[in-house]
Image (cartoon, rainbow, N blue to C red):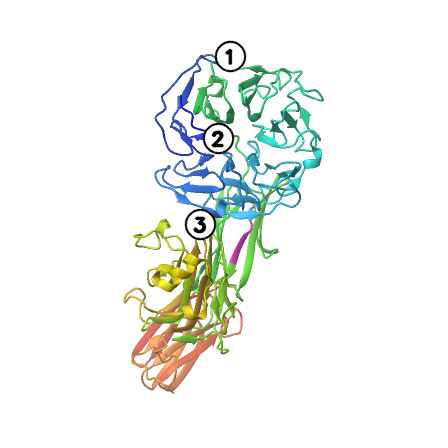
Amino acid sequence: QNTTQFYAADKKPGEDVYIGGAQDNSTWHSGANPGPNSQWSFDFGGDGAEVAWNASDPNLVLGSSQGGGYNRSTDAGATWTAIPAAKAGFSPFISKLGYSHADPDQVFTVGFNGVGRSDDFGASWEINPITGNWLGYRPFDNVEVSNADPRVVWISSRLDIDPPIGRRGGIHISRDGGLNFTEISANFPANVIEASGIATHPSDPGTAYFLFSAPGRPKILKTTDFGQTFVDISGFGGSASSTRGFPDVATFSLVVMPFDTNILWAGTEIGLFISDDGGASWALTDSGFPTVSVFEMKLRENQIVVATYGRGIWSVELPELANYSPPVVTLAPRLRPLEQDFSLGGAIFVKLDLRSSYDSTKVFLDGNLFANIGVNDAPLDTLFSFVPTQSAPISMSAMSFKNGDVYKSSQRTFQAISLSQPVASLAVDFNSGQFIDFVSNGFAITTAVGFQDAALHSPHPYPNGAEQIFTITAPIIMSTGTISFDEVVIVEPGIAGVPNHTNPNFFDFCVVEGSSDGISWVALAPGYDSRDDASWLATFSAGGPGTPALFRPRNITIQQGLFEQGSNIFIRFRLFGDAGLAGWGWAIDNLEIQSDVTSVASDDLTPQTFSLAQNYPNPFNPTTTINYTLPAVSDVKLSIYNIRGQRVRTLIEKKDQQVGTHSIKWNGRDETGRSVSTGLYFYRLETAGLVLSRKMTFIK
């Protein structure tokens, strides 16, 4: 017999069951029919915790392993990628995945730090702390999403004090899709301690079932009012035995049949118990299903899929479930992760998916109304953009309304960058007062412990499962492409022989990256770790800190052809930490970028050709700067035209302008002083025998 342990399973339509772990050599078995034309069958096995597949895209699969290990597949399980951001702190041994096929993109995890929430099936995550009593790490701490309304999310942890830490847990409910939770622990009877399972109702979002396993106490508590009151439908009451035929054993799972909600299947440690009268009476199934622990049950298509402890995955077809599908529900709007395009003047693009029809939708920026959207009769994808006026964290959210109900998106936070003027070179030692425009996630210019002078430092130690990024907001005008700095690198080394930092077995790494648009970044040289210097590696192995004596020089030359000469590029420094070990971190000093180049903006230089630079910023509001160069004294005319070819304004009309680089600002107004409308414009430079033009975008 197979003795592998199973905790949960899920099933793609018409295909194999998904389970955690490796496939073994189990055989198929069948048992007596539990009903007409039905048959139990035993599916292949493996060791694992929970698995979920996306009903909208069966190629998307999530799997978990003990202690908060989560992975994601985009090719139906052929390959997997770790998603450490899904771990909400110290996690249960049986790592939970809460989801509902009514909203297949919404997924939850639980841990000591709260609830992990994703609205794009694990591609991105937010961790929402829980206010009130919460533990989150015990094996039976759980999260369950309502089958009737995915806005209703239940989470549970031990109700009384957990002796190892002297801290009490609790049970909570969310009615806005896991964005906020309310504790309902006080509504439970005093004689229940720790829920061993949660189940929901197929059509009533206010109905849920909390399962328990303590001897002589209730095993199934039912609520029909979102957890305000509970009734024991297992028949224990105040006695040590059930008056309804329910066994005094651990209870882990429950399914309510959608074709008749009075029919309940309860999974216990001694087998499957069934009630056909809403829990008024219970009996062990006589269908031939073995008397084994039933940890999880899923209703999929015309089948019930059952995960057992030690006896594999089972499924049974029920004719009454023919053509069953989850209820069609109104989905919450979804904000996709924000993007900022440096090539368009630093415009931030806000992509909003209106996934259902709504009466209206409001979009908020830092809590203030940003946009109003009227009725949408069908799902709609919409796009907003704006140019930030300062470098600062921002937050955006959306709220849709339908028939008096409110549907909220998650809140997206983003480090907005207000771009600085382009520079030809940069040199800074972080200590003598030179100015450098930057934004940072984790890095700081500081004098660290053990150092005498200021430098750029990552956190010491840096956190696991996170990235630390330092971005210079002044674009560099590409010329020689030289970058040099001194550094100390005490970060976890990867597996010997792994050649590239993009391989997960490289583990932690430092890398310098460049971009022309701030969206797509490329490594300017291969990433590296403490193995790059013997003293760094010895310090990491000894668990020691970085010191000034460990500074080593690094020189990088940007590969020719990677960026066009004269184009604006952006530079950032990134420290990646995987979910494993961490070290002291990264320190950088004496940074020089193209220090062998004299600024092309200098009038001391004689330009070799006429040129018209891209305006900056672009898109813009309210002003933008246009630069152009003259290699000889020349008559000059610089004009603005709209998309219909009509001249909007003449900025410069001058005879015999001198050699050099020249600059002019446009405030987005026409010849009469009125602000122009949002849209595409052209600016044209006319000189002796030469006309140059470029596009730009004005946004109100």
Label whose residue precedes the other's in the sequence (2 or 1): 2
Which image quarter: residue 20? top left
Kind of residue at badge 2 = Tyr
Whole-percent x and y of residue 532? 34, 62
Kind of residue at badge 1 = Asp
Relative to 277, does residue 298 appear above or below in the rendering? below
Label whose residue precedes the other's in the sequence (1 or 3): 1
Disc 1/disc 3 C-alpha distance (Å):
48 Å
Look at the image and give the residue range highlighted in magenta.
Answer: 409-414
Which residue matches tag 2? 7
Label whose residue precedes the other's in the sequence (2 or 3): 2
Which residue matches tag 3? 580
Is-magenta flag for residue 410?
yes
Q: Nearer the viewer, mark 2 or mark 3?
A: 3
Which residue matches tag 1? 286
Near mark 1 (Cα within 10 A), the count class, few <14, some 14-19 or many ≥20, is few
